[in-house]
Image: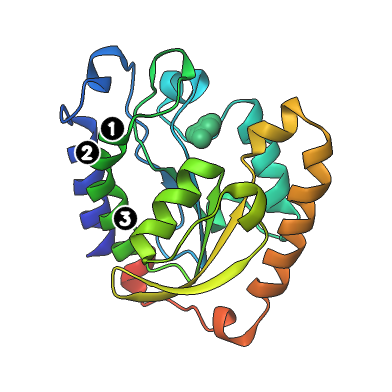
Amino acid sequence: MKGDELKQLEDEIRNCIKCPLYKSRTNTVPGEGSHNPAIMFIGEAPGKQEDIQGRPFVGRAGEYLTHLISTLDLKREDVYITNVVKCRPPNNRDPTDEEIEKCLPYLRRQIKLLKPKIIVALGRHAAKTLARESGISFKGITRERGKISRVRIYGLEISLVYTYHPAAALYNPNLKNIIEGDFRKIKELLNTDDTKKKRGTLDDFL
Ligand code: URA
């Protein structure tokens, strides 16, 4: 059952020692949310609060992401939230290419199990990684944000959307309007017939 497979994946992540980040982490942050989400949000890597709590996007950037999700008339429990890298890089430095590569099989399995209709990549690291995994080019977050691409990823046909990382808006209020505009586009996309068709079997809710 999907719930069991997700639980097993979480356990594997909790015991992961594939890259050096395991030495400095307090907790791994596998991800959380609906097991049958129409939409999946993928950030970069856990920060301090996430490392302490073992949950994604629970610090200040997370508060803003939770607000942005509410503008879609959704709650956090209606979506799935995770990161490309599941452990906190020391001092919140950028994850290295090696850390991303080592962690990517977990994200791949999450996407294949959850089968979202829409993936929103938050920030350049997630955007670059998901573009590459979808086999499409990526010319930088400033040029690509707000675009909606129909892509095939891991055998699924989905809409891939990039926007700025919510933390960026905390440091640069000008980006807030842009992110909020991107979320209005995501809301329209969510209301298209194809996305509304997302339904689960009983198993999806267990
Ligand atoms: N930034 C991220 O990219 N992910 C989190 O979970 C928190 C902050």
Residue occupying the point 65% across, 26% down: 60
Structural crowding at the residue carrying mark 1, measured as other residues with C-alpha within 10 Å and reported as few (<14), some (14–19) or many (≥20):
some
In terms of image quadrants, where is residue 172? top right
Q: Which residue is mark 1?
A: 99
Q: Which percent across, then down, holds residue 203? A: 31, 70
Q: Which percent across, then down, holds residue 79? A: 53, 56
Say which label, 3 or 2, has the lower sequence index: 2
Three-letter amino acid code at disc 1?
Glu
Q: Which percent across, then down, holds residue 160? A: 52, 65
Q: Which residue is mark 2?
A: 102
Residue occupying the point 29% across, 75% down: 155
Which of the numbered marks, if any, corresponds to residue 159? none
Q: Which residue is mark 3?
A: 110
**CA gap, disc 3 and disc 2:** 15 Å
Residue occupying the point 66% across, 48% down: 142
Three-letter amino acid code at disc 2?
Lys
Three-letter amino acid code at disc 3?
Gln
Q: Is residue 147 left or right of residue 79?
A: right
Label 1, secondary structure: give it.
helix
**CA gap, disc 3 and disc 1:** 17 Å
